Image (cartoon, rainbow, N blue to C red):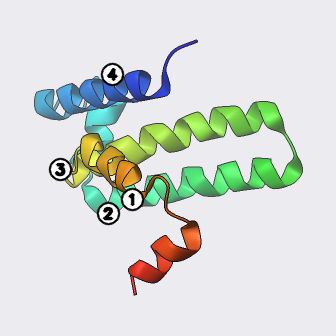
């Protein structure tokens, strides 16, 4: 089994390479990024809704594939805003060991 942070880091590297190449005619990722950050965010939202629907319906197989789409589109959205995955991972590390109630209260 592949370690989750490793596969996400490799996927992020691929997305960033496609962004740098800007080959929208040959790369779905580059084409999506060329549409701008708002479109990338919209696409992430669409995929999240699809995952929610599959979860509500109890379809584990489709939930798995939709969640893979969610993670991909999350990384595209982050790339569109120049937010590195390591920043998100650092935030998760910062929150580790803190109760969700306490963490939410700290955000005011």
Mark drawn on residue 41: 1
CA distance separating discs 4 and 2: 24 Å
Circles 2 and 1 in contact, beta carbons < 8 Å: yes
Residue drawn where x is 19% and y is 26% of the image: 17
Residue drawn where x is 26% and y is 35% of the image: 30
Which quadrant holds residue 46?
bottom right
Mark drawn on residue 82: 3
Residue corresponding to mark 4: 10
Mark drawn on residue 101: none
Residue drawn where x is 37% and y is 48% of the image: 93
Q: Nearer the viewer, mark 3 or mark 2?
A: 3
Q: Nearer the viewer, mark 4 or mark 1?
A: 4
CA distance separating discs 2 and 1: 5 Å
From the viewer's side, name the closer residue of 10 and 49. Answer: 10
Q: Nearer the viewer, mark 4 or mark 2?
A: 4
Image vertical order of residue 9 relative to residue 106, above or below = above
Circles 3 and 2 in contact, beta carbons < 8 Å: no
**Is 97 left, or right, of 41 in this rendering?**
right
N-terminal of the pair, mark 4 or mark 2, is: 4
N-terminal of the pair, mark 4 or mark 1, is: 4
Residue corresponding to mark 2: 38
Considering every residue shown, the one lying at the far top of the view is 1
CA distance separating discs 3 and 2: 13 Å
Image vertical order of residue 62 relative to residue 55, above or below = above
From the viewer's side, name the closer residue of 75 and 8. Answer: 8
């Amino acid at each position: 089994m592949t370690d989750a942070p490793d596969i996400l880091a490799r996927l992020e590297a691929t997305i960033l390479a496609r962004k740098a190449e800007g080959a929208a005619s040959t790369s779905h990722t580059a084409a999506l990024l060329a549409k701008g950050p708002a479109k990338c965010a919209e696409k992430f939202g669409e995929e999240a809704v699809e995952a929610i629907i599959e979860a509500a319906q109890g379809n584990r197989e489709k939930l798995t594939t939709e969640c893979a789409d969610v993670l991909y589109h999350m990384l595209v959205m982050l790339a569109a805003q120049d937010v590195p995955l390591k920043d998100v991972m650092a935030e998760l590390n910062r929150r580790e060991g803190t109760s969700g109630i306490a963490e939410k209260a700290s955000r005011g």
